[in-house]
Amino acid sequence: MNKKKLLKALFYLNIAIVVSLIGYKVYLNLVTSEFEAEHTDQLAAISARLEGQDSYSFAVVGNINNSVGIFERRIIPMLNDANVDFLVSAGNAVSSGGEDKYRAIRGTLSRLDMPYLLTFGNNEYEEFGSFRFYDHYGPHFFSFTAGDSRFIFLDSTEKTPWQWQLRWLTDTLKADESTHRFVFIGHPPLEPEEAFFLAEDDDFLQPAEFRSALLQTLENFGVDRVFSSNISIYSEQEHNGIPYITTGGAGGLVLNQDESFYHYVKVTVSADGSVEHSVEELEVGQHPILKQLESLWFFIHSLFYVGYLNFILLVSLFLVISTKLYNAVFVGKEYYPDYDIDPEPWLKKTMRVAMFTNNYLPFIGGVPISIERLRSGLVQLKDKVLVVAPRYQRAAEKEENVVRMPSLFSFGEKSEFRFANIFSGAVRKKVKAFKPDIIHVHHPFWIGSLGVFVARRLKVPVVYTYHTRLEHYAHFVFLPGSLFRNIIAHFLVRRFANKCDGVIVPTQSTEEYLRMIGVKRPTFVQPTGIEFDRFQQVDAKQVEDLRKQQNIGDETVFVSVSRLSNEKNIDFMIDAMAQLKEQTDKAFRLLIVGDGHQRRRLQGRIDDMNLQQHITLVGAVPPEQMAAWYRLGDAFLFASQSETQGMVILEAMAAGLPVVAVRSSGIDDVVEDGYNGYKTPAKQSLWCERVKQILDDTDLRQSLSDNALAFARDYSVEKFSKDVRLIYAETLARYHQTK
């Protein structure tokens, strides 16, 4: 049988097991019932059996341990044929005190043809079993008379204070006029003469004071036999004329040797007043392999007695296994790219692309600008593009091929994030009327989720561009920051990306991150394009006018372009500029282009630190004017760690600016240290040192500038659009090949 056939057989076996377990559960629910105070009925049955009898016999077993293979199937038939009147468990009838084990032992003991009683032992006490024993059977210590004998049951688990039990035992024996007395206690009061290597001190009656006082009390009043269990042996000792019998072979861990074997003890009380006992041994021991199979069976068997929780968990486990086996058997996996995919037919036709984004122009940000450049590039390549985005007050009244969605609410001083009405049926109708070949989503939630939903309804593939490190936006979320950063953000990205048919990432380091968090969809590394030529065609007069507007003289000018928000790390740059001011006499200015909800606070910090001559918050600048603002600078400074690429860094390089940035996943693949700029850890002293180096060394600054310009030349919008178009074509070919 080959591997595939074997896996297929295992799959159907799991399905059969699940069906059988469900059927068995239904059966058990029909035939099992709740039970309580079981000893009451059992004592009544014992009294009825012994009434009028001059002689009688009973069996004592220990360490049943819920054994199905030995006790239920082998020893119970022996007991039913042994002509005994009732059975006593000397302790450890259950393998633990769980509810399922109590229900299971009741099912097992119901196969007896005689009444039975249980001693409260160590296993009965485990897992909060004491209250279950009390509810299902009765008190932990008790006594009763039957025939001419008194039967006494003691608690050896320390659940009941031993001093109180001894007081009760003494009073009971003082008033007792029975001919015979039998005592049952879970832990043996005496250790065997030959040490049993599996026994430990705690397996015997503790504490020592209880043991000593009990032995003395039993000697003072005289008893016929003392029975206990707790260790898997048969041991018989006489102490001060009283036989102490340890019987632990009814189904627990038995070694099948001289002192450890399967057995029960038969006790006979004759009409002449004599008491005799004998050891009834099970002739054939259970094979070790069969014993392991029995244990596995009982584990499954007993789970069904405890209600629905364990049942659901067990069935779920088998369903998971079945699903995994199904995927292994029936779902083919190819870990290498499919080189038979042919994108050419799609490249030759006009594509219809619908883009879904949570923000878009006129809102200024990296994602809206990236989307606009891609849209423009695709249109130049004769494709049709529809953009689905929130509505802004500043948006044009009529926009061709843009579907605006009314906002439900927004937050941020500048309304940076708008939650649009994704439930609008009109939007879905417009997208459907557009008849897209492919849908491109730019955020892993809200409007992005709408894009995936629409793609599934229209039966077209969906591509997702991972623009933003979501974990750095915890301050915008009404959840504990660490919870969002460490768990929720990664979960959202992974879950969303795996719903898509392809994922575009701007850098190799970003692709590595997605693989680490568990994204398994086809991934394409595609940096965002920049309008390189526009940065080479800047009007010199426009730049000069800006210099006059900003009162720039002979000082070295640093430029930074960033939204004024927490995740952009603006405070880091402000503190570094204060440090640089103390380290140099050279004049410098930092122009921070951009706006955001933190502007007022940041301006207050600049004023408080007396940095007005060194730092200027320029505010928002229209995208078409940005090339001239870059040209004002001698170098570009950046401290954000939330970027996946840092498109503004490429724009700065296209303007010939060397870059000093804080190292992060989006920076590492763009800034080549010592070639087109510098990247440092998020330590102000190191970052400031690199800024000062560029400030002091004009030749170094020019060399880095030339290299930056050469580096940026490879990131044109035209090349970017063609590469993304190829990604669309490959995704479409793969999607329709599998349909």
Image (cartoon, rainbow, N blue to C red):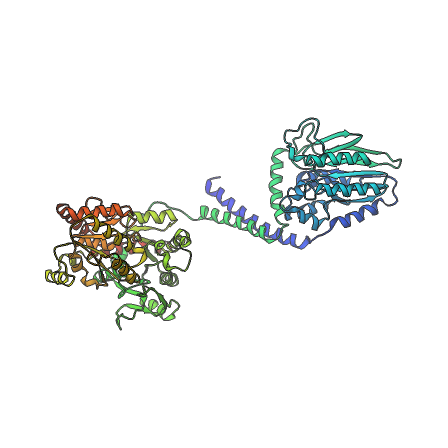
Count of marks placed on residues: 0
Decide which of 485, 160 is in the foreground and name it.
Answer: 160
* On screen, residue 626 above or below 67: below
* Image position, residue 636 (x, y; %): 20, 53
Name the one closer to the observer, 332 or 180: 180
Q: Quadrant of the C terminus?
A: bottom left
Question: Can residue 78 be seen in this snapshot?
Answer: no
Q: Which residue is nearer to you in this view: 521 or 152? A: 152
The reply, left or right, for residue 308 in relation to residue 626 is: right
Residue 219 in the image: x percent, y percent? 79, 33
As drawn, which residue projects farthest toward the bottom?
397
Q: Position of residue 125 (x, y in %)?
A: 66, 44
| Any part of residue 363 in sight | yes
Residue found farthest to the top: 194
Residue lying at 86% horizontally and 34% vertically, measured from the top left: 274
> Taking 212 as reference, is 336 left or right?
left
Which quarter of the figure has residue 213? top right
Return the x and y of residue 418 as percentages of the image width and height: 34, 65
The answer to which image quadrant residue 289 occupies is top right
Asked if residue 361 lies left or right of residue 165, the reply is: left
Q: Is residue 205 above or below residue 570?
A: above
Query: Of 446 and 220, which appears nearest the observer?
Result: 220
For this orientation, the residue located farthest to the left is 541
Q: Is residue 618 left or right of residue 425?
A: left
